[in-house]
Image (cartoon, helix red, strand yellow):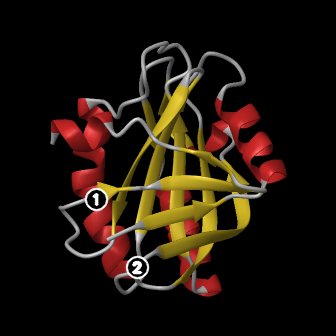
Amino acid sequence: MNVMLDLRPGLKRRIWAHLLQNGLEQVAFAFAGVAGADPMVLNPKEAYLAPPDDFALQTGDCIELGDEARARIIKHAWDTETALVEFHSHPTDRRPAMFSGSDLAGFAEFVPHCRWRLRGRPYLALVVNPVGVDALVWTAHPRSPIALNAIRLGYGRRIVPSHRTIAAI
């Protein structure tokens, strides 16, 4: 299955600026419409840039959203009938982007719950660092992600994720 994320360049710049702002891991979410089956295209309608008050824990190499923030974000996706696109950063990592072991453990807990609450809508997670991006998409089984093929920025421009995580799991 092919999955694409259509991300307007202005929205991409806004999200990346938030994620890479200060050496601490950051989080943003986009609420996306879903079109097609193969390719499936996620098209963000709006974004939420998580402020410091949303975090139970936030350091240079670890982040955890608080329960209230998670519930609010899932509720907004429910209310807007959108899929969730999670962005988070590894701002000090200069290697090709890859999710950490703690990221994967968090997905094992959060993604099945989120997809259940959103009646099986896809969940897309991206990790951004200063040199690139990696991405995982859950479209079928909540514990078996697939690779995101590309982020399409318009005018034929695209970002291809590193695919390091999918190759390792």
Name the residue rendered at 84%, 50% in the picture: 10
Residue at image coords 65%, 33%:
19
* Front residue of 60 and 125: 125
Say which of 42 and 99 sits in front.
42
Alpha carbon of mark 1 to alpha carbon of mark 2: how far? 13 Å
Q: Nearer the viewer, residue 132 or 155?
A: 155
The residue carrying mark 1 is 146
Q: Residue 95 appears at what percent x and percent y?
A: 43, 15
Q: What is the number of the mark on residue 38?
A: 2
Identify which amino acid the numbered label 2 is placed on. Answer: Asp
* 161 versus 132 height, above or below: below
Residue closest to the eye, 129 or 63: 129
Q: Secondary structure at mark 2?
A: loop
* Quadrant assignment, res 22: top right
Quadrant for residue 105, please give it.
Answer: top left
Locate residue 163, reporting x and y percent.
34, 40
